[in-house]
Image: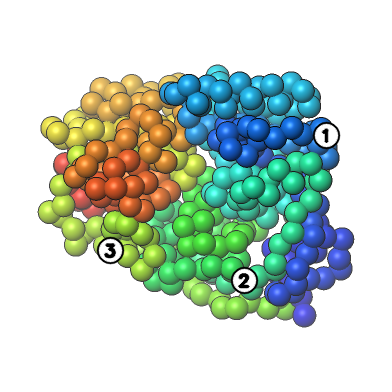
Amino acid sequence: MGMTMTEHILARASGQARVQPGDLVVCRVDRAVLLDLNFGALFGEKRIRRLADPRRVAIVLDHSVPAPTVADAENHRRARAFAAEFGIRHFYDVGAHGICHQVIAEQGLALPGQLLACGDSHTCGAGAFNCAARGMGAEMLAIVCTGQTWFRVGPTVQYVLHGQLRERVAAKDVFLHIAGTYGEHANTNVEFTGPGLATLSVMQRHTIATMCAEISADFALFPADEMLEAYLAGRASEPYEPVHSDPDARFAEVRHIDLSALEPLVALPHTVVHNVRRLAELRDVTIHQAFIGSCANGKLEDLAAAARLIAGRRVAPGVRFIVTPGSQEIYKQALRAGYIETLVEAGAVVTNSTCGACPGLHMGVLGPGERCITSSTRNFQGRMGSPEAEIFLASSESVTAAAITGRLTDPRDL
């Protein structure tokens, strides 16, 4: 019996010829990524004497940048001291920062066939690069010191994509369709394949893989194809070996999705699991804030789509439209393309590149009774501020449409 992409990577990382669901494997980690929040509770009071391999460690200041509180400033100071003490070459300080998952994508630090661990739950987004990536908690301390971690190999569900997304239907809608139709994927891996992949950009794939954290998937992988090879050309930080699922690989289920049949969707408060509706059904829900950003949708493609849709229009009275680029590189590209000027002219606020409003830390925290539509990653109660606020989760196109009309709106209606 053959192996899936995830099984191939875990087999290589654990030094075995073959693994299968149920196996417990101890793996060598190819890349360990730390962020500013890790230098609080996790690394703040620990005295580490040595790292397994400083060359395989990256640090990205991302959640609270620039520091909005004294505690955040102290986390940043600790991160700088840690990077200096251990000679961390891949250190992305304020000014070279961005959301960690976007930065490691831009820097070619998540590569096909490799195993990556990071102290943030949306690490599975690196699966877009044919990389088995998973968010870890306190385990990151052991990983940077020993270079290893362990996993229970889970079963894999395969999604076969066909067709092509129609205009103003986004990669986020692909995920929302999966979450609404199939629900949780706990202790399970997800794999994407099919002819429809050729119509999805690398960053669209990154959006889908990132969002798989919200259905509790362990790993979410895409295959390495010509599009990915072109993205990594001149960007990859080291040589790599892609993996592919064997023709006789065993899947828990194989599910087919016709991309051309999808339409704009929205997750209602306070979960995405079996809680998704067609936007066309919800025309009377007014909003106070619209947010575009996060590791899932703070991409150049998101800013471009928002700018195209809002050009010549204005943000509705009483609505705050906040746009947060995913990295400094995206910010610069959006500046050069004129997207930021278009958004600001329309009445949007374009912020520094950071996690910002997504985790409810700064630059867009919600108050009691407020209603927000967001293209970020999560909509659970209290995620973006007050537990008395409501969060609707949708694509950046759908968020922009709501910012223009002041209510939930199918972007195809504009």
Whether 213 is drawn above or below 371: the answer is: below
* Picture coordinates of residue 196, whole percent (x, y): 51, 62
Out of 395 and 42, give the one closest to the viewer.
42
Element type at mark 3: strand
Q: Indicate the secondary structure of the residue bearing disc 1.
A: loop
Label 1 to label 2: alpha-carbon separation:
36 Å
Q: Residue furthest front?
A: 45
| The N terminus - image quarter | bottom right
Q: State the image coordinates of residue 51 (x, y, percent, origin top left).
A: 81, 36
Q: Residue at x 86, y 65 (%)?
A: 16
**Looking at the picture, does residue 267 appear above or below residue 374?**
below
SS state under label 2 = strand
Left of 217 or right of it: where is 24?
A: right
| First-in-chain label (2 vs 3) | 2
Q: Earlier in the sequence, mark 1 or mark 2?
A: 1
Residue 287 point in image, percent of width and height: 19, 44
**Is the C terminus in the top left, top right, bottom left or bottom right quadrant?**
top left
In the rendered structure, find residue 156 and report the number of the disc placed on it.
Answer: 2
Q: Are marks 2 and 3 in contact (CB under 8 Å)?
A: no
For the residues labelled 3 and 1, the Cα–Cα distance comes to 51 Å
| Residue 402 visible to an observer of this rendering | no
Q: Which residue in the structure is indicated by mark 1?
A: 50
Amino acid at the residue labelled 2: Thr
Question: Which mark, by number, is residue 129?
Answer: none
| Front residue of this view, candidates 15 and 83 | 83
Write the residue at 18% across / 58% down: 282
Between disc 3 and disc 1, the foreground one is: 1
Q: Which residue is mark 3?
A: 277
Q: In the rendered image, which quarter is residue 186 located in?
A: bottom right
